[in-house]
Image (cartoon, grey):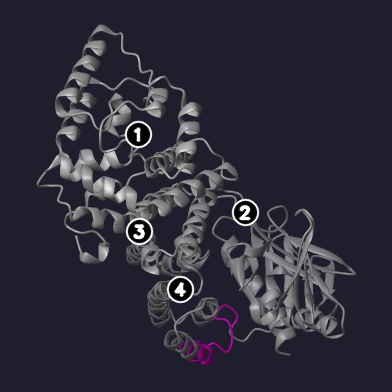
Amino acid sequence: MSPDDGRSSGDVFAIITAPEFYQQNPFRQTGPSVLAGTRAASKRLDALRQTLELGTAEYRWAFAPGLAPSAEQLIGVAQTLKDPRRRFAYEFFWFWPESYPDESTDEALDCLARREVEAALESWRRAEAAGSAVAAHNLAVYYHLQALGGEQVWSAADKTRGVVWTEAFARWHALEANTDLWTRVESRLRELDEPELPLTMVDEMRAALPRVLATINAELLVRYTQREDIARAKWHAGFLHEVNSKFGSGTRLLERCARPLAAQLESRLAAAEHAAQAAPADALYEIISLIEPVPRELELVEQLCGQDSAYVLELRSSFASAVLDRLVLYQRETHDNAACLRWLKRLQGWRLKTELAARIREIRTVVGDRATAPPFMPEAQELAFVLDGHRLRIDPTGIQFDEIFLPAKEITGYRHGRAPIGKASTVSTFTVAWWSERGEVVLDAQNFFGRKGVDETAYARIVAACQRWLCPHLVAWLAGIVHGGHPVFIENVSLTPDGVVFSFPASAPPETTLVPYPDLLHTFDADVVRLADRREPRRSVDLPAHTTWNAAIVGELIEKIHRP
């Protein structure tokens, strides 16, 4: 294990990394006092084995396991209790008598033995108010136990999660500075007098406590990410960032928590590389899948460490550089300049290291010089399709669909996208639509798309033709409205000369926020256009591109308004 992991060779907390460690605590599983000696612990285990054999096992102490442990599990408990280091780690994260490290009768622990949890809590709260370090420790254990147990039952939006987790972290961090607590721990080590538990371990434990707490939540974050439970993953990323800022545990701790997510990004790169080599024809799809949508791991690391974190900038730039290398290789092999330009532009919208951003600009300039026209219509002045009995023509004058003609200069609304209903769907989900006072044209599965293997090619060609011939008119017209002092509305946001106004009518009270254009973040990933406040990224609006008029061109429109 490397020194950079933040663990010493004598780290007694090494086993406390999994969210289930309270469930695995031998004192919870079998009910003895944490100060029970070897003989008392063995006697307790023998009694439990007998009740198992007789089928009379009853677990009546507080927080006892719901199901009686098997004989094999009791053997594991016995082995843990015989290991001084493992035993002491679990002892630290369980309830102590007020006299700790001395054994004595204890009112609160007697209440727990009778499953009177509220009475025990009341006893600890009174003692904590009087300055008891042991009571403060027991309350920290209680809230931490409740927080981890609640992860099994809380909904993604349950506000109880935040209250309980905050209570647990606040108490543990206060105990980090509690001299009386660590004096008691040192006394306990003296009493145990085990070679594997040296007195120098006290300072190591004290320093390691913030890392132990954060590691547990980071493990939950990774698990939720792997399960595609992004709402819960985002909650833990935001919580870790918030408590780190509050308690000042340092940026290196958050970076350590982010490393498993960074490793998942590396795995994603490796998988895309392998897939591209296995099917070269799908290489561009594999490249696109790396950045559209923006990898959830990258978004979570940004939320965890902070948008302005040097670690985030390094990780994002490293990932983008690898994608860029694959994109350049694809361009050299296929000369598909038009497709490469689109994704170079997407990468150029990322916040990257200065030298990498400059490299992307240079490559985009070179590729752009080679791509004077899209490869699918090298010298054409129109795009024409006949699909499923319908005729479509797009040229600089406008759109002709069957008998309907919409002049380019009269088009006031445009939308396109692919509804995210799952990769396995056999139903076409592509939509391209235009609106003017003359009427509306909508291309979708009902009238145009629907041929397997044809949809994606046709869709890409139609969108490219619109970007080339029609969108410049629409963008210029909408920008002119804004420059004339009138807002342009796109769902619940409005574009004004000074910036974008976000409206949140569902909030109480309804909230309206003006975000100046220099502080605006804009992304278009998969089917979702996102506008966010760079100063407060959580303040954002998501616009489904396939249903929201003019959402697909909002980036070009903002650029035109801000830099006419």
Which stretch is magenta?
363-377
Q: Going by the image, does 351 lie left or right of 475?
A: left
What amino acid is at disc 1?
Gln
Foreground: disc 4 or disc 2? 4
Which label number is shown at residue 33?
Answer: none
**Residue that appears at 43% across and 80% down:** 331
Rendered view: 25 above or below 550: above
Q: Quadrant of residue 471?
A: bottom right
> Which of the two discs, 2 and 3, sits closer to the camera?
3
> How many angstroms separate mark 3 from mark 1 (CA)?
24 Å
**Tag 4 residue:** 309
Residue 555 spot, x, y in % from top left: 67, 76
- All told, the count of numbered labels is 4
Whole-Å distance between the Cαs marked 4 and 2?
41 Å
Question: Distance between the Cα atoms at labels 2 and 3?
Answer: 36 Å
Q: Residue furthest left?
A: 195
Give yes or no for residue 202 being in the magenta stretch.
no
Q: Which residue is mark 1?
A: 23
The residue that mark 2 highlights is 428
Contact between marks 4 and 2 (CB within 8 A): the answer is: no
Q: Which mark is residue 260?
A: 3
